[in-house]
Image (spheres, rainbow, N blue to C red):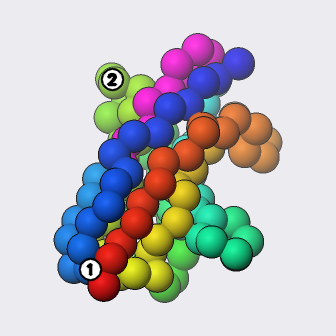
């Protein structure tokens, strides 16, 4: 099992930045990739970004590319999501999820709330 804990959310103003953290524990050696997802009020959960922990690559939803950056610190078993130039439409609960190679995202954190005021 892999346990994930997100942190770093909060209430900010439009144009501000936030860095979310996703700390993993447990069978972290089995984790191949980590993704960030978000669910805005009244909307479906959507993919934000993902990273493979072997350094193969990073992936973003097109609409967020350039404002959001995903990175990892493998020594700390932590993945980050740097969010810049935040907009009110970025308001959502942000979740990180982990997957093993050739599997779906099986492990999820509890989420961290981000509220962007105009």
* Mark 2, secondary structure of its residue: helix
Report x, y in % for residue 104.
78, 46
User: Which quadrant holds residue 44?
Assistant: bottom right
Residue 105: horizontal and vertical position, in percent? Answer: 72, 45
Q: Nearer the viewer, residue 2 or 100?
A: 2
Was residue 53 drawn as part of the magenta stretch in this picture? no
The 10 Å Cα crowd at callout 1, few under 14, some 14 to 19, many 20 or more, is some
Q: Which residue is mark 1?
A: 14
Against 118, residue 60 (above or below) is: above
- Find the residue positioned furthest to the top: 26
- Within 10 Å of the Cα at label 2, are there few (<14), some (14-19), or many (20+) other Cα atoms? few
Q: CA distance from mark 1 to mark 2?
A: 33 Å
Reading the chain from its start, which is encountered first: label 1 or label 2?
1
Q: In which quadrant of the rendered view does residue 42 lie?
A: bottom right
Label 1 element class: loop
Question: Residue visible at 32% across and 61% down?
Answer: 11
Q: Which quadrant is the C terminus positioned in?
A: bottom left
Number of numbered discs on residues: 2
Q: Is residue 21 magenta?
A: yes
Query: Which residue occupies 70% across, 18% down?
Result: 1
């Amino acid at each position: 099992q892999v346990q994930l804990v997100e942190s770093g959310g909060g209430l900010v103003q439009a144009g501000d930045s936030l860095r979310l953290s996703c700390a993993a524990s447990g069978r972290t050696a089995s984790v191949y990739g980590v993704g960030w997802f978000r669910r805005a009020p009244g909307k479906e959960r959507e993919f934000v970004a993902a990273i493979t922990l072997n350094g193969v690559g990073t992936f973003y939803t097109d609409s967020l590319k350039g404002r959001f950056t995903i990175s990892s610190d493998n020594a700390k078993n932590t993945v980050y999501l740097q969010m810049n130039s935040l907009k009110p439409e970025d308001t959502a609960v942000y979740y990180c999820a982990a997957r093993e190679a050739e599997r779906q995202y099986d492990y999820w954190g509890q989420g961290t709330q981000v509220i962007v005021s105009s």
